[in-house]
Image (cartoon, grey):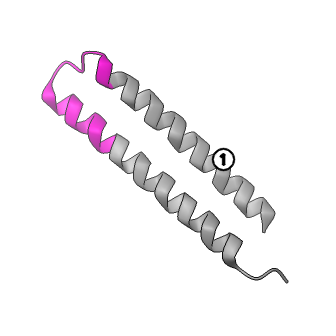
Amino acid sequence: MRADITVINKKINDAKKEIDRLEDLRIKDLSNSINYIENEIQIQRCEAQVEAYETAVELINSLPTP
């Protein structure tokens, strides 16, 4: 089960890095409002992924060990 948590933690870190990258784009000119909206949607999607992965880790950790 620890291998599962390691894989999930890697996915959490990857999603957080993507959030950082997308947030950096906020500072730059996104040329138009559609690009800005798409960027914001991507940020929300990544934040939801992080939350889901963290919930999965909590559930795995709450399982009784055999």
Q: Look at 15% across and 23% down and name the residue there.
A: 32
**Image spot of residue 35 (x, y percent):** 22, 29
**Image spot of residue 33 (x, y percent):** 14, 29
Which amino acid, mark 1? Lys
Quadrant (top left/top right/bottom left/bottom right) for the N terminus: bottom right
Corner quadrant of residue 43: top left
Quadrant (top left/top right/bottom left/bottom right) for the C terminus: bottom right
| Magenta residues (range) | 26-42
Q: Residues within 10 Å of mark 1 (few under 14, many from 20)?
A: few
Q: Is residue 59 above or below residue 12?
A: below
Q: Does the magenta portion include 5? A: no
Q: Is residue 59 above or below residue 54?
A: below
Q: Does the magenta portion include 37? A: yes
In the picture, measured across the screen, residue 29 lies left or right of residue 22, that is left
Q: Main secondary structure of the magenta part?
A: helix
Q: Which residue is mark 1?
A: 10
**Image spot of residue 54 (x, y percent):** 56, 59
Q: Look at 44% across and 37% down and name the residue there.
A: 19
